[in-house]
Image (tube, helix red, strand yellow):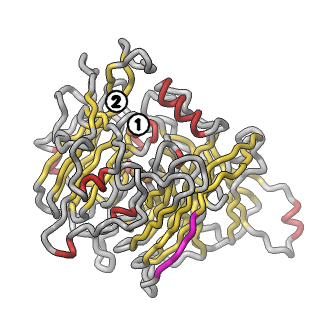
Amino acid sequence: RFTRHYKFDIKLQNVTRLCQTKGIVTVNGQFPGPRIIAREGDRLVIKVVNHVQHNLTLHWHGVRQMKSGWADGPAYITQCPIQTGQSYVYNFTITGQRGTLFWHAHISWLRATVYGPIVILPKRHVPYPFPQPFKEVPIIFGEWWKADTETVISQALQTGLGPNVSDAYTINGLPGPLYNCSAKDTYKLKVKPGKTYLLRLINAALNDELFFSIANHTLTVVEADAVYVKPFKTQTVLITPGQTTNVLLRTKSKSPNAKFAMAARPYVSGPAAFDNSTTTGLLEYEVASSSTNNKNKKKQLFTPVLPKLNDTLFSMKYNKKILSLANPKFPAANVPKTVQKHFFFTVGLGVLPCSKNQTCQGPNNTRLAAAINNVTFVQPNTALLQAHFFNQSKGVYTTDFPANPAFKFNYTGSPPNNIAVSSGTKVVVLPFNTTVEVVLQDTSIIGAESHPLHLHGFNFFVLGLGSGNFDPKNDPKKYNLVDPAERNTVGVPSGGWVAIRFLADNPGVWFMHCHLEVHTSWGLKMAWVVLDGKRRNQKLPPPPSDLPKC
Ligand code: C2O
Ligand code: CU
């Protein structure tokens, strides 16, 4: 076991995109941020020093954080923010995971510019379950705004359905030539013929699921959310914010006299405003320097064809293809076979009463909110994990988060009259090692929409998904308990449901939320409190001494 040290200085950096320069919050002045590389089993010690005027926290998205909840990072859930001039050391071990994850700021919308890849290699001498790639390349998708992040947030929260749309999507921070003034800001992947490349795809965009494709090349999906999957070939990958997908790219056996565009564009399932533009990069074959002839010839450019913007059928089919690899050499993790606690969570929008000094963008003098089981989560003023650990939950949170929705209706039909939600800082308390099943049901209130639900601290198994209303009698009979996908983020299908299961074996407080930032801001979030077990090694250790104070 190895300890890897990183120093992350949070500072402002001027960056120019789309012909405009603005100061953005970065790590070490880099955009996208630095890559973290570790091996399974390594300890990471990351010292974060905040030099900017914003409060900030960082989150290591998808890292299980076994008994290291103090290092998880969501602001006011596991820690108070790191204030200007302060620092905090994130200290955790990567246990039982390898693959691609990412890190990002976890406060307000700062992850718009503060994000970077986490590459976890297998243990030494442990091979991949696929051909050893010639090269590994992180490809991280993002969004770019001309306005500064604060303006974007206040626009999003005040106007409701827009114009919180970005001005460009980016590939490794670059918009590409389809945007004004961006031809020079194009991501180029130079490849050799006849080789296998491992592309580590990460969707760090704030508000959009993305289709991704490379012209005239087939991709083989081998890993999702740092878990090996049964390999399958596809022209197009669909990736929600918060998801990561590793794909193999086999290059053509001879360098063609052509260039191939790679492109990413949103999958749009809901009524919200969005940026329907396309970011592109280039796949370029290296040509031997002797063939100068070839070099001077103008190369033909091929462009990929992506599914249409609202192709929910593609989404449903694609997500059903993601299954754990589950072979004798790489067995799947154990799916809990029995369930101790069942939950049925509706996820979607709703409205709250609106007072005079607020922006009432909802119908009949209301404001829009997003909710789980009709509860809009209210961010506390102190971190839930501290309140829990020191038995000071009074006045911070209540333990009555409902296991079922407040009222029943045809969730995917026409909305009921009563679309009001309530608000509160409510959690579910789970005894150590509880087996939990959650059916997540999208609702059509305001409009059906896919929600990428992300759970901190665990991987969950995706037992089944479907369209329409979940059928509690028949759908569970079709659950996959053999080789279900194991992930940390799943798209609740637009106008449909998904069933997940996990074992609550990690004591702490764990956030669960939609990874569309606008929905999180509107309250589509809740938290699980997992109690300590009886044995010594089943308890959450006390916080590090430098844990920030609120
Ligand atoms: Cu990627 Cu709660 O976050
Ligand atoms: Cu959502």
Q: Is 48 left, or right, of 227 in this rendering?
A: right
Residue 244: % across, % down: 46, 58
Q: Which residue is mark 1?
A: 519
| Residue 509 is a magenta residue | no
Q: Is 262 left, or right, of 500 in this rendering?
A: right
What secondary structure prevails in the magenta region?
A: strand
- Front residue (pair 378, 280): 378
Q: Which residues, given as a range, are shown in magenta?
A: 3-8
Residue 349: assigned label: 2
- In the image, residue 91 sits, relative to residue 108, either above or below, namely below
Q: Quadrant of ligand 2?
A: top left
| Identity, as a three-letter code, of the amino acid under mark 1 | His
N-terminal of the pair, mark 2 or mark 1, is 2
- Front residue (pair 317, 228): 228
- At 42% from the left and 31% from the top, the residue drawn is 270
Residue 92: assigned label: none
Q: Quadrant of residue 35?
A: bottom right
Label 2, label 1: how far apart the Cα atoms are: 8 Å
Q: Quadrant of residue 424?
A: top left
- At 59% from the left and 47% from the top, the residue drawn is 53
Q: Residue furthest bottom?
A: 125
Asked if the beta carbon under badge 1 is closer than 8 A to the nearest atom of ligand 2, the reply is yes
Mark 2 touches mark 1? (CB < 8 Å): yes
Residue 251: % across, % down: 62, 67
Residue 218: % across, % down: 54, 59
Q: Indicate the secondary structure of the residue bearing disc 1.
A: helix
Crowd class of label 1 (few under 14; some 14 to 19; many from 20; radius 10 Å): many
